Amino acid sequence: MGALLALLDPVQPTRAPDCGGILTPLGLSYLAEVSKPHAEVVLRQDLMAQRASDLFLGSMEPSRNRITSVKVADLWLSVIPEAGLRLGIEVELRIAPLHAVPMPVRISIRADLHVDMGPDGNLQLLTSACRPTVQAQSTREAESKSSRSILDKVVDVDKLCLDVSKLLLFPNEQLMSLTALFPVTPNCQLQYLPLAAPVFSKQGIALSLQTTFQVAGAVVPVPVSPVPFSMPELASTSTSHLILALSEHFYTSLYFTLERAGAFNMTIPSMLTTATLAQKITQVGSLYHEDLPITLSAALRSSPRVVLEEGRAALKLFLTVHIGAGSPDFQSFLSVSADVTAGLQLSVSDTRMMISTAVIEDAELSLAASNVGLVRAALLEELFLAPVCQQVPAWMDDVLREGVHLPHLSHFTYTDVSVVVHKDYVLVPCKLKLRSTMA
């Protein structure tokens, strides 16, 4: 997984992963389990359909040998390392010859599957080999020969491999949903793009992704990470279905895009007025002859940065706060540089990463420009530190109140989720759950 996510193309440095994930063997087993009802519906529709030969002959009589029931007894998926997947389906049929006791039949289907990446960048699950076998469950030789004759008329063995292809339509729709464009704010979106087909190993199926960000429909060229993203080997004893990995660069790119979208241009209310402020900074009194409310207008002066350490996530903001009065004609008379470090709390709701500002860990104010003379740093902090520390986190939380969509398939949600912050990356172990509307 670490080697997969660390892939970098020296010719195209922007083609670098910033997140990824691994579907564990337990997750693969869960996908096989929830696929049984869908497989049964597809096979029942085809196997129990009226024979085309009867329709061509214009016969209105039912077939002398008809399938009365179709049940998928077992469906499993296993990894073929460095190749793909093996699909196994066990189907139990009952065929009722005219005026006879229904005959039990067992169909075994084995298919090898692989994943390709199409020219549109979407992943596609394909069949590379298919081996169906049909067997009548009879112990006596005479009955077995008679059963074989009936089976040859009722079950089209070659058509069973076409049914396997039909079974892949739904998984392929889900793989396409992985690359959907997800909203972050009303004018900011993100999209996860596979860099290559997934890697199959005994540990599971690993996929590396690159996140692209858009503002008003235009792709934002985010800075290239100075360090390739990699992660350590995952524990073989994991009970999770899926383990997502998100790099420090992913989070920094997210905030960089939000900055470009103007999401962090904020207005901060203050309890001060020009009259009360003039008591501390006397030259303010000469600028205003009436008492007006003081307003703080803040914007980022350089790009924000996320720092991930063991057990800790923090956001570093570099703001310029313009202090002034007047509405709607705001006029600034003082500019302050504010360097703020805010602790971040990360959690997951459904398939979204929720990011909230836990606490201001550090904040420094310094004079940037002044029309009212020199103002000491200690006085700046006395007057303006409290509103900055109170309002900036609230503003940031409001911007990301809807959360950030994680890589996911549209008909699945995440449960039993934990978020583990490591140095340079975040791990999100979770279990998959098919949404109730699709069950």
Image (cartoon, rainbow, N blue to C red):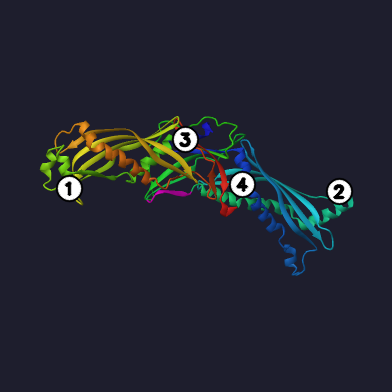
What numbered label is drawn on residue 139? 2
Say whether disc 4 or disc 1 marks the residue closer to the N-terminus.
4
Q: Quadrant of residue 260?
A: top left
Q: Is residue 336 left or right of residue 186?
A: left
From the image, which quarter does the N terminus lie in? top right
- The amino acid type found where label 4 is placed reads Leu
Circle 4 residues within 10 Å: few <14, some 14–19, many ≥20: some
Give the residue type that dot 1 points to: Leu
Q: Nearer the viewer, mark 2 or mark 1?
A: 1
The circle on residue 292 is 1
Mark 3 and mark 4: Cα distance apart in space: 32 Å
Determine if residue 207 is in view.
no
Number of the front mark, 3 or 4: 3
Q: Position of residue 139 (x, y in %)?
A: 86, 48
Q: Disc 4 marks which residue? A: 126
Q: Quadrant of residue 198?
A: top right
> CA separation, marks 4 and 1?
69 Å
Cα–Cα gap, marks 2 and 4: 37 Å
The CA span between labels 2 and 1 is 98 Å
Residue range (magenta): 180-186
Dot 2 falls on a residue whose secondary structure is loop
Q: Residue at x 73, y 67 (%)?
A: 56
Q: Amino acid at mark 2?
A: Thr
